[in-house]
Image (tube, rainbow, N blue to C red):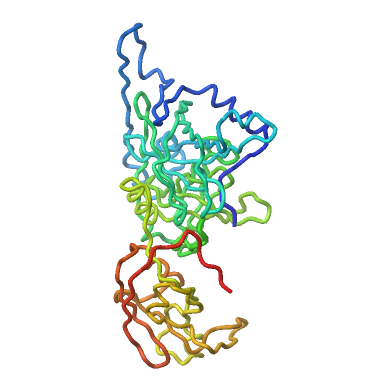
């Protein structure tokens, strides 16, 4: 699986990036910018500059049923931006032989205040525990304006970042967040972004699958991910996946590829996950995730029958992390294992979690979804089955570590 942020570390690629930046507008250290747009108007020497923000609200797309790609693009492409990130001690380093690193991805405008959503991996570099933010971040709008952006916060667990630009003098087209809870396989979608640096590119397709799980920057799973055959490629990272009405249903993040290019298997972070992340990033600059400390595998009917369990669904505990909330609550994977249907080392006498706070587990990655939607320090009741006995276990969730524990 590959993340989609295009990143070039060569001096030649860096020089191209710098040349492009030099053609943009000047910026201050707080992310404000002197917009190069004519919207500000001319000013006399010594007079006070007045810059206005024009916000275009888009409504009514897709109400006739199908996805009108041309209308959707015409209305919403102005809300999709290119994000340019510069890593290292400064832009000057990029011209040296051992220079820094430049990355490029996509993003989209959230509101008229200048907030922009993108992927965390577009504006950070390195392993999650040691990840470093870009020294400089620029947002390029569809009209050519390029302004400096401030990183409000990044969430490596969901691969989401929130940026802020000075909206004064800019034309902004916010894109509405939709819902990912009621998606259906086969419904039409569109992706807009900057694949391989080709700005404002549109691709269309369908939702190929739902309830996928993809790996975050911390190696914890992001559940309910959306699979699509709409072409996504390096540089699409952070751009929106849109439904027929033009609402964001996900943020394009990863591809599964043998060649490094888009092969019709792209993945987007579901917007319900995105919404929570953006809300907390705006409020506090970080996102709190509860941590249980178990590795599990889904229970399915044939396996449940083989283990002589009454229920057909749940999370079979495979490993319990040392000193974790699960260990303190005495959850156990058991000592005996079996081989079944081509799989080895399946615990056969341990715990199966069948519900969280009374909500039954019904999908493969439901346990991770239900736990990660809660904050550290929160108490939850787990319904746990071992053999023929079902019991209730109260667990106080811990703070999620910077990296998922490795299995022995």
Q: Is residue 179 left or right of residue 214?
A: left
Which residue is more in the foreground, 6 or 330? 330
* Residue drawn where x is 42% and y is 68% of the image: 368
* Residue drawn where x is 30% and y is 67% of the image: 378
* Residue drawn where x is 33% and y is 75% of the image: 395
> Which of the image's four quarters has the C terminus?
bottom right
Q: Does the rendering let one see residue 370? A: no
Q: How far from the left and from the top, in percent, is residue 361? A: 38, 75
Residue 359: quadrant of the picture: bottom left
Q: Is residue 32 above or below residue 207?
A: above
Q: How far from the left and from the top, in percent, is residue 300? A: 48, 81
Which residue is more in the foreground, 268 or 187? 268
Q: Is residue 267 above or below residue 351?
A: above
- Residue occupying the far top of the picture: 45
- Residue occupying the far front of the picture: 323
Q: Does the rendering let one see residue 365? A: yes
Q: How far from the left and from the top, in percent, is residue 249? A: 40, 52
Q: How far from the left and from the top, in percent, is residue 207? A: 48, 57
Q: Is residue 13 above or below residue 161?
A: above
Residue 257: quadrant of the picture: bottom right
Which residue is more in the foreground, 188 or 150? 150
Which residue is more in the foreground, 407 or 245? 407
> Which of the image's four quarters has the N terminus?
bottom right
Q: Is residue 112 above or below residue 153?
A: above
Q: Is residue 36 left or right of residue 95?
A: left
Count of numbered marks: 0
Q: Is residue 12 left or right of residue 56?
A: right
Residue 48: quadrant of the picture: top left
């Amino acid at each position: 699986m590959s993340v989609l942020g295009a990143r070039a570390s060569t001096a030649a690629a860096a020089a191209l990036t710098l040349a492009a930046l030099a053609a943009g507008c000047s910026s201050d250290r707080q992310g404000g910018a002197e917009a190069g747009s004519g919207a500000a108007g001319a000013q006399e020497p010594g007079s006070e500059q007045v810059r206005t923000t024009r916000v275009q609200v888009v409504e009514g797309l897709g109400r006739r049923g199908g996805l009108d790609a041309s209308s959707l693009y015409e209305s919403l492409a102005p809300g999709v931006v290119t994000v340019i990130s510069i890593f290292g001690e400064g832009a000057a380093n990029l011209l040296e032989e051992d220079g820094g690193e430049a990355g490029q991805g996509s993003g989209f405008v959230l509101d008229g205040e200048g907030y922009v959503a993108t992927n965390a991996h577009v504006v950070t570099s390195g392993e999650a525990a040691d990840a470093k933010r870009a020294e400089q971040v620029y947002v390029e709008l569809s009209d050519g304006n390029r302004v400096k952006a401030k990183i409000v916060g990044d969430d490596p667990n969901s691969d989401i970042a929130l940026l802020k630009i000075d909206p004064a003098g800019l034309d902004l087209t916010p894109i509405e967040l939709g819902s990912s809870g009621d998606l259906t396989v086969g419904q039409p979608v569109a992706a807009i972004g900057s694949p391989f640096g080709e700005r404002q590119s549109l691709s269309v397709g369908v939702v190929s699958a739902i309830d996928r799980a993809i790996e975050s920057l911390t190696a914890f799973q992001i559940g309910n991910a959306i699979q699509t055959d709409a072409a996504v490629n390096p540089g699409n990272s952070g751009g929106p996946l849109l439904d027929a009405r033009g609402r964001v249903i996900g943020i394009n993040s990863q591809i599964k590829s043998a060649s490094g290019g888009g092969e019709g298997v792209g993945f987007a972070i579901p917007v319900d996950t995105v919404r929570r992340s953006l809300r907390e990033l705006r409020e506090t600059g970080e996102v709190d995730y509860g941590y249980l400390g178990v590795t599990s595998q889904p229970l399915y009917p044939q396996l449940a029958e083989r283990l002589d369990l009454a229920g057909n669904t749940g999370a079979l505990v495979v490993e319990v992390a040392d000193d974790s909330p699960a260990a303190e609550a005495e959850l156990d994977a058991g000592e005996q294992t079996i081989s079944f249907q081509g799989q080895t080392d399946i615990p056969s006498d341990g715990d199966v979690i069948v519900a969280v706070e009374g909500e039954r587990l019904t999908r493969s990655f439901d346990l991770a979804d239900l736990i990660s939607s809660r904050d550290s320090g929160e108490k939850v009741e787990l319904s746990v089955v071992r053999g023929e006995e079902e019991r209730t276990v109260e667990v106080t969730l811990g703070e999620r570590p910077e990296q998922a524990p490795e299995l022995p």
